[in-house]
Image: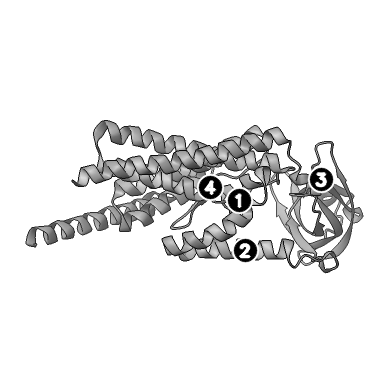
Amino acid sequence: MQKEDNKTDSKSGSSKWYLGSAAALLLLKGKSLLALLKFSKFGGALISMAFTIGTYAIIYPWGFAVGFVLLLFVHELGHVLAAKRKGLPVSTPLFIPFLGALITMKRHPLDAQTEAYVAMGGPLLGTVGAMVVYAGAYATDSPLLYALAYIGFFLNLINLLPIHPLDGGRISTAVTRWLWLVGLLGGIVVIVYLKSILFFFIWALFAYDLYKKYVKRNKKDVKVQSLLQKPLVDVQHLYEQGYPLPGPEHTRRLSFNTYSDLEGQQYVTVYMESLDVEHTLLLPQQCLVQHVWLNGVEHIPTPDAYQLRLLCGIDYIPFENDKYYEVPAASRWKFGIGYLGLALFLMGMMYVVHQHIGDIRL
């Protein structure tokens, strides 16, 4: 017992030493690191990844923390690559300790087939990543790699549950929305099994969303939503002429025109006649634009130009296109077979890895 305690104290002291060294490095070289990262669009992803690894390392061994976050990264990279193939702009992955990782799409898919394609990319590449770890574990007989492989298969399997906003809930849109009912009922079983407050929260939001869509749905009770856009306009010529520019608190209603291109992407063009400004903004989804407001102005003087950032609030009603869920039968079968096949494969690999872990313990 004395030796084990000494080992524990040594490990704890070692962890504190590493954390202290990392903190000192950030204090001494923080400005240099930030200067390096700000030139890269992956700066935020790297910072959140490093912070998440550090957080997990307080509880788990460093090797497990690094491997776990890398598996999350591979999963999210699958979504990014799938979205890029469909021409959808997405953010870099953001890692949140004990919640996972996520990407945000700057433009919504225009049909259920595209949504399912992007959703499928995550668990597919995530499964490949877990298989690579499993191959390494099999070759080296490493308990750490076996544990990482098991958690990798498990996380990708959980993500396939037909519950929004999990990947399975999005893939279901291209198979059949009846799978959402399976997710609603099966989610209760998973909550009881995992005893996870986070998963209960996800399930509760999903259940409430289904309630609003299919039970409480009332077209007379449509709520207007708001979106804030911040276009940057050049007013150097007006500034040089001494033209009075609007102040930071300036608000007014703006004229606008909205249209959609042949691919179904919607835009809104706003006009500010006093500045002779015409600016076209991209809308994240199909909607009925009600009003466009100027909610303030930010002045941005630079050595080369004088710019204004217009805080444009767009009031809109989301347009629910029934054709969104119209997917060809052949595509439904492909997604359905791929979805079921991947879920069964992940369950099989979890069983295989569990057997290896059992043999190591024996």
- Do callouts 4 and 3 mark residues in contact (Cβ within 8 Å)? no
- First in sequence, mark 2 or 3: give its number: 2
Residue position marked by numbered label 4 in the rendering: 160
**In front: 235, or 362?**
362
Identify which residue is drawn at 76% across, 64% down.
Answer: 248
Badge 4 amino acid: Leu
Q: Secondary structure at mark 1?
A: helix
Identify which residue is drawn at 54% across, 41% down.
Answer: 340
Q: Nearer the viewer, mark 4 or mark 3?
A: 4
- The circle on residue 266 is 3
Taking 139 as reference, is 36 above or below it? below
- The circle on residue 207 is 2
Q: What is the quadrant of residue 290 in the picture?
A: bottom right
- Do callouts 4 and 1 mark residues in contact (Cβ within 8 Å)? no
**In front: 135, or 358?**
358
Pointer 1: residues within 10 angstroms few (<14), some, or many (20+)? Answer: many
Q: Between marks 2 and 4, how big is the CA–CA gap? A: 17 Å
Residue position marked by numbered label 1 in the rendering: 169
Q: Between marks 4 and 1, how big is the CA–CA gap? A: 7 Å
Position of 274 with respect to 224 (left or right) is: right
